[in-house]
Image (cartoon, rainbow, N blue to C red):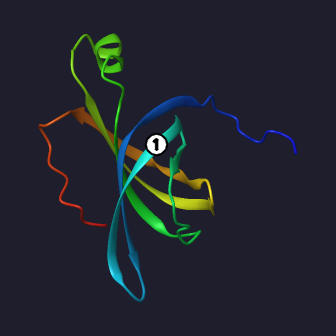
Amino acid sequence: MSERRKLERFELIGPARIMMHSAGSGRSEYSLKTRDVSADGAFLFSSETLPEGTDVKLEFVLAPDMPGRLSGHKGRARVRVSGKIIRSDSDGIAVRFQSNFKITSFGFVEWDGALA
């Protein structure tokens, strides 16, 4: 199988939260961990398979030292992004990001959890 990725992936293991709507059970929220992240998606460890094609909201934290190197600020940064589950298997789930995302200083913006 040939590698199809066009963007570099970075190992980033840390806390993540994913929210989704499902027809039968309404809104669901899962606390997971990221395995790796690229500019257009992420892979998250998950013990259960989630429906492929489902629109989700994803929130995760950048490594504690990364924001300082990028912006001159110390501390953590939170990434909030919408996406779609493109693969789900026994290892976890792959989420492809939509083009808009938001990176904020950790602790300043509370996520209301709404799926727009």
Q: Which of 91 and 23 is in front in this view?
A: 91
Left or right of 94 in this view: 34: left
Q: Is residue 81 left or right of residue 83?
A: left
The image quadrant that residue 29 belongs to is: bottom left
Vertical position of residue 106 compared to residue 115: above or below = above
Residue found at x 11% / y 37%:
108
Dot 1: within a 10 Å radius of its alpha carbon, few (fewer than 14), some, or many (20 or more) residues?
A: many
Residue furthest left in the image: 108
Q: Quadrant of the N terminus?
A: top right
Compared with residue 52, is residue 67 higher up or lower down, i.e. above or below?
above
Measuring 54% from the left and 37% from the top, which residue is drawn there?
36
Percent position (x, y) of residue 18? Answer: 37, 58
Q: Position of residue 104 (x, y in %)?
A: 23, 34
Q: Which of 67 and 50 is in front in this view?
A: 50
74 and 72: which is toward the camera? 74
The outermost residue toward the front is 47
Above or below — where is 35 with respect to 95?
above
Q: In which quarter of the image is the C terminus?
A: bottom left
29 with respect to 9 (left or right): left
- Name the residue that disc number 1 marks: 34
Residue at position x 51%, y 50% in the image: 45
Which amino acid does the dot numbered 1 rest on? Thr
Q: Where is residue 42 in the image (x, y as percent from the top left)?
A: 52, 44
Q: Is mark 1 on a helix, strand or loop?
A: strand
**Above or below: residue 68 compared with residue 47:** above
Which residue of the protein is positioned furthest toward the right in this rendering?
1
Counting the numbered discs, the total is: 1
Q: Residue at x 51, y 70 (%)?
A: 54
